[in-house]
């Protein structure tokens, strides 16, 4: 997933039309789908029973902290070094992250082995379960809201408010900041009350 992130940074920098930009973003989304579920499963396997929320809150703090700094940093780099430099910086940071993972992330043995027997449930049968359907709809709605916010806020900032890219980046970053700082608290709360 991190390797795909690195490759898509080149795609973004070289995109010369909207179709290439959309395809590059779709590929980047596939890379993200390869990273975050694995990170969360890894954290779940590392945590002590009953302490999953605390550790998940900490990893979400790190993830959202980076996510809140990214738009500001990208806007700042774009203002001073150009748009391509912002994308190349994203690629370099992704390669750096990949190197850190390969060198320092220890292998762990999962405590929860899933048996191959009885694993033939389809996605459609899973989504019919009320709790899973509710979680899916909540996440889907959240992602749609974030996507709309992050798409139109920069357009509003640029076209209506005539803001620089770094100021637009700060605005986008602030939208993530409250969620970021609340992660450890809500993680610990999830360990104490019925999830």
Image (cartoon, rainbow, N blue to C red):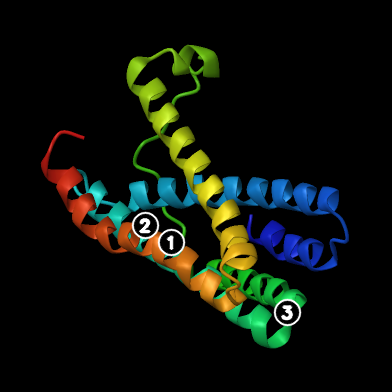
**Which comes before the other along the chain, label 3 or label 2?**
2
Percent position of residue 33, x then y:
58, 45
Q: Earlier in the sequence, mark 3 or mark 1?
A: 1
Asked if the residue at tag 1 contacts the one at tag 3, i.e. Cβ–Cβ closer than 8 Å, the answer is: no
Q: Is residue 174 left or right of residue 1?
A: left
Q: Label 3: which residue?
A: 85
The label on residue 51 is none
Q: Are marks 1 and 2 in contact (CB under 8 Å)?
A: yes
Q: Quadrant of the C terminus?
A: top left
At mark 2, the secondary structure is helix
The spot of residue 160 in percent (x, y) is 59, 63
Residue picked out by circle 2: 60
- Taking the view exactly as shown, the residue that stands out farthest to the front is 160
Q: Position of residue 38 (x, y in %)?
A: 50, 48
How far from the left and from the top, in percent, is residue 27? 73, 48
Q: Quadrant of residue 71?
A: bottom right
User: Does the image show residue 175?
Assistant: yes
| 190 and 112: which is toward the camera | 190
**Image mark for residue 63:** 1
Q: Label 3 to label 2, Cα distance in Å? A: 27 Å
The secondary element bearing badge 1 is classed as helix
In front: label 3 or label 2 = 3
Q: Residues within 10 Å of mark 3 (few under 14, many from 20)?
A: some
Local secondary structure at mark 3: helix
- Badge 1 density bin: few <14, some 14–19, many ≥20, Cα 10 Å: few
Towards the viewer: 133 or 168: 168
Q: Quadrant of residue 58?
A: bottom left
Q: Is residue 192 left or right of residue 84?
A: left
């Amino acid at each position: 997933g991190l390797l795909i992130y690195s490759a898509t940074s080149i795609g973004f920098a070289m995109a010369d039309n909207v179709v290439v930009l959309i395809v590059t973003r779709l590929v980047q989304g596939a890379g993200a789908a390869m990273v975050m579920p694995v990170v969360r499963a890894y954290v779940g396997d590392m945590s002590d029973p009953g302490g999953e929320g605390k550790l998940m809150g900490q990893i979400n703090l790190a993830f959202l902290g980076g996510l809140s700094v990214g738009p500001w940093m990208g806007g700042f780099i774009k203002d001073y070094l150009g748009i391509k430099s912002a994308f190349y910086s994203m690629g370099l940071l992704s390669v750096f992250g990949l190197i850190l993972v390969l060198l320092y992330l220890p292998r762990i043995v999962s405590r929860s082995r899933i048996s191959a027997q009885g694993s033939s449930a389809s996605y459609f049968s899973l989504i019919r379960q009320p709790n899973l359907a509710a979680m899916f709809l909540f996440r889907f709605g959240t992602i749609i809201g974030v996507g709309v916010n992050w798409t139109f806020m920069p357009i509003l900032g640029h076209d209506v408010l005539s803001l620089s890219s770094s100021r637009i980046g700060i605005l986008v970053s602030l939208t993530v900041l409250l969620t970021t700082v609340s992660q450890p608290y809500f993680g610990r709360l999830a360990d104490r009350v019925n999830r």
